[in-house]
């Protein structure tokens, strides 16, 4: 029988967290699942841990990359063999709350949602469950305004039929999940936001999505992300995309400012490009965004853009 839910876990050197992560899936009271674990050529005991757990549960499918290809390729490998009606991505250092999958499955069947979004923060003790229905256009608006619908692929449930032709871009080190999430929204008709939390997010420095402190070539992936989003064949106001681009550039400006002098010298032209974009667009962003935090950041940038905070002194 085809499973109702496929959970895909990309793994790289997660031996301290992996068993808890896997058990949080297989110990759910909802049994109609398959768990696809894709080891991205770990150098620690991650593969052995997954192998041991897979030997005791035939719902676990264990795959191993021949070489380290990154989180995007690992997730794509999982998608290529997934059979569940719904798909959930789980990072190997995170875990699911107890007995959440049955509720998620029931919610999707009741609403017909193509994508279910839940913020992976706090606990899942929700006294008054709230649902918010989004059309495709409204979801795009919220996504590009960085409000409620994040770019992270985790913390979401996808109907497999709407992502059957969507894959993660493996030429990106980060931001690839943002492109994937945007593509999935653009391919959906019903998107639901719920305050019911099923996903527990844990921060660690050496995770699959971790980045070096210094500004590097990886940070340049924001330009790829914008390029891919501009190619999506869905009609929406260009001002929303400019808001999203402003947020990405401002975030990377802050990363640049916290980098070493050598990194600042190497990427001074990139800084100038991002700074110029923010300088040209901060007022329109402040006027048009529906996100109060983004509005505040835009106004502060407009006030301080000629001050020391945004000056590049290492060019």
Image (cartoon, rainbow, N blue to C red):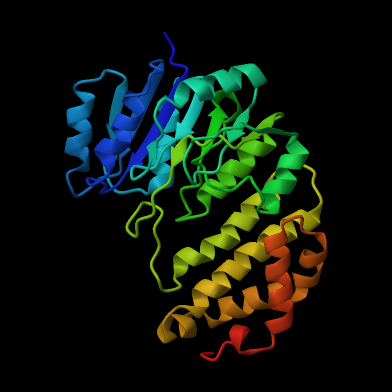
Where residue 201 appears, as percent x and y from the top left, is: 43, 46
Q: Which quadrant, please, contains the N terminus?
A: top left
Query: Residue at the location (56% across, 42% down)?
Result: 180
Give the answer, above or below, for where 160 lies relative to 71.
above
Q: Residue furthest front?
A: 127
Location of residue 288 with respect to 255 vertically, above or below: above
Q: Position of residue 231 (x, y in %)?
A: 68, 48
Along the viewing direction, whichever of 98 and 225 lies nearer the viewer: 98
Quick check: can you spot residue 233?
no
> Can see residue 43?
yes
Q: How many marks?
A: 0
Residue 207, horizontal then vertical, whole percent: 35, 53
Locate residue 81: give its quadrant: top left
Question: Camera-side residue: 32 or 252?
Answer: 32
Kindly identify the residue that appears in the image at 41 percent across and 74 percent down: 214
Left or right, 255 with respect to 144, comes to left
Q: Nearer the viewer, residue 189 or 196?
A: 196
- Name the residue rendered at 37%, 43% in the picture: 94
Q: Residue at x 44, y 37 (%)?
A: 76
Q: Where on the picture, by quarter, is residue 275?
A: bottom right
Q: Is residue 13 above or below residue 304?
A: above
Q: Is residue 256 left or right of residue 150?
A: left
Q: Which corner quadrant holds the C terminus? A: bottom right
């Amino acid at each position: 029988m085809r499973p109702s839910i496929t959970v895909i876990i990309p793994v790289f050197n997660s031996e301290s967290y992996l068993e808890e992560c896997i058990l949080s899936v297989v110990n759910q009271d909802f049994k109609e699942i398959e768990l696809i674990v894709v080891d991205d050529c770990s150098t620690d005991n991650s593969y052995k841990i997954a192998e041991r757990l897979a030997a005791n549960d035939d719902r676990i499918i264990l795959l191993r990359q021949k070489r380290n290809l990154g989180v995007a390729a690992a997730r794509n490998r999982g998608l290529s063999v997934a059979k569940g009606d719904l798909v959930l991505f789980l990072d190997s250092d995170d875990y699911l709350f107890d007995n959440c999958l049955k509720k998620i499955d029931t919610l999707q069947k009741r609403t017909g949602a193509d994508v279910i979004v839940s913020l992976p923060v706090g606990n899942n003790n929700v006294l008054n469950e709230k649902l918010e229905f989004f059309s495709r256009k409204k979801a795009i608006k919220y996504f590009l305004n960085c409000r409620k619908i994040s770019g992270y692929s985790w913390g979401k449930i996808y109907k497999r039929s709407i992502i059957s032709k969507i894959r993660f871009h493996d030429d990106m080190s980060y931001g690839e999940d943002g492109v994937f999430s945007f593509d999935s929204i653009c391919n959906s008709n019903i998107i639901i936001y719920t305050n019911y939390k099923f996903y527990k997010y844990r921060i660690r420095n050496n995770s699959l999505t971790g980045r070096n402190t210094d500004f590097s070539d990886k940070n340049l992936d924001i330009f790829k992300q914008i390029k891919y989003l501009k190619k999506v064949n869905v009609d929406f106001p260009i001002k929303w995309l400019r808001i999203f681009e402003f947020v990405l550039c401002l975030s990377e400006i802050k990363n640049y400012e916290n980098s070493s002098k050598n990194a600042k010298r190497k990427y001074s032209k990139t800084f100038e490009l991002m700074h110029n974009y923010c300088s040209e667009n901060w007022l329109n962003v402040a006027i048009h965004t529906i996100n109060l935090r983004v509005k505040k950041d835009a106004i502060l940038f407009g006030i301080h853009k000629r001050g020391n905070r945004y000056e590049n002194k290492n060019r």
